[in-house]
Image (cartoon, rainbow, N blue to C red):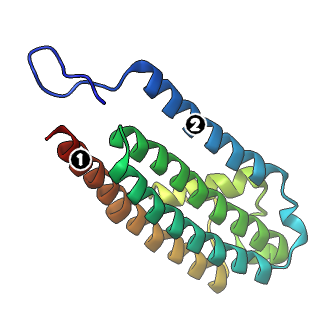
């Protein structure tokens, strides 16, 4: 349970719990990044890449639903929500980056330049962050549709999922503290 702050109110969880939570999140992010770096993504046809993206997004949706339940029953719901969001956002970025990489390999004119693994992550993150520097752009209609789909999914993930996850953590903490 969270400690009560001097004078009443909410205090942070014990440092050991915070360190363990941060450690799990970092390990998960590193594992997803390593998987992205090592998978033979260049070998698959684009149809396989799109199918894997669809299956991956369904899996991400299932993971998010499962995390809502876990956050609601966690001893430290705020920590659990932060872990869940770190993993969900990283998985989201990896799924789209892998698809963009695959698309760039399969259709060289789909983007303004050939994408390396690093370029694909960079493009995904700049799109996710709504920065869009313009140095890498989708050119082909299919690539533009995929990027548009990512933009819509970005808004859903940031607008709905992050807000709902934080609200779930707040409600769980309030219910536990009562």
Dot 1: what SS? Answer: helix
Q: From the image, which quarter does the C terminus lie in?
A: top left
Query: Percent position (x, y) of residue 170?
Result: 23, 47
- Mark number, residue 170: 1
Residue at 42% across, 53% down: 70
- Mark number, residue 102: none
Query: Percent position (x, y) of residue 32?
Result: 68, 49
Number of numbered callouts drawn: 2
Residue at 47% across, 70% down: 153
* Mark 2–mark 1 distance (CA, rounded to whole Å): 21 Å
Asked if the residues shown at circle 2 and circle 1 are in contact, with their CB atoms under 8 angstroms apart, the answer is no
Relative height, residue 141 to residue 88 (above, below): below
- Residue 164 seen from this side: yes
Relative height, residue 83 to residue 156 (above, below): above
Dot 2: what SS? Answer: helix
Residue 83 as seen in the image, left or right of residue 5: right
- Mark number, residue 24: 2
Residue 67 as seen in the image, left or right of residue 48: left
Relative height, residue 87 to residue 101 (above, below): above
- Residue 133 seen from this side: no
Query: Percent position (x, y) of residue 139?
Result: 65, 76
**Which residue is at the front of the view, 54 or 12?**
12
Residue at 55% across, 50% down: 87
Residue at 49% across, 59% down: 128
């Amino acid at each position: 349970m969270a400690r009560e702050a001097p004078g009443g109110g909410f205090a942070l969880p014990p440092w050991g719990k915070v360190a363990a939570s941060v450690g799990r999140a970092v390990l998960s992010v590193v594992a997803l990044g390593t998987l992205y770096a090592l998978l033979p993504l260049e070998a698959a046809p684009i149809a396989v890449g799109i199918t894997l993206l669809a299956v991956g997004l369904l899996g991400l949706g299932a993971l998010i639903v499962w995390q809502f339940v876990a956050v609601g029953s966690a001893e430290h719901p705020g920590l659990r929500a932060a872990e869940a969001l770190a993993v969900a956002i990283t998985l989201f970025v990896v799924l789209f980056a892998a698809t963009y990489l695959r698309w760039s390999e399969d259709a060289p004119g789909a983007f303004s330049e050939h994408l390396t693994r690093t370029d694909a992550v960079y493009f995904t993150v700049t799109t996710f962050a709504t920065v869009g520097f313009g140095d890498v752009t989708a050119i082909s209609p299919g690539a533009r549709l995929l990027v548009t789909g990512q933009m819509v999914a970005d808004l859903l993930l940031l607008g709905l999922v992050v807000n709902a996850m934080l609200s779930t953590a707040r409600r769980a903490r309030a219910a536990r503290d009562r």
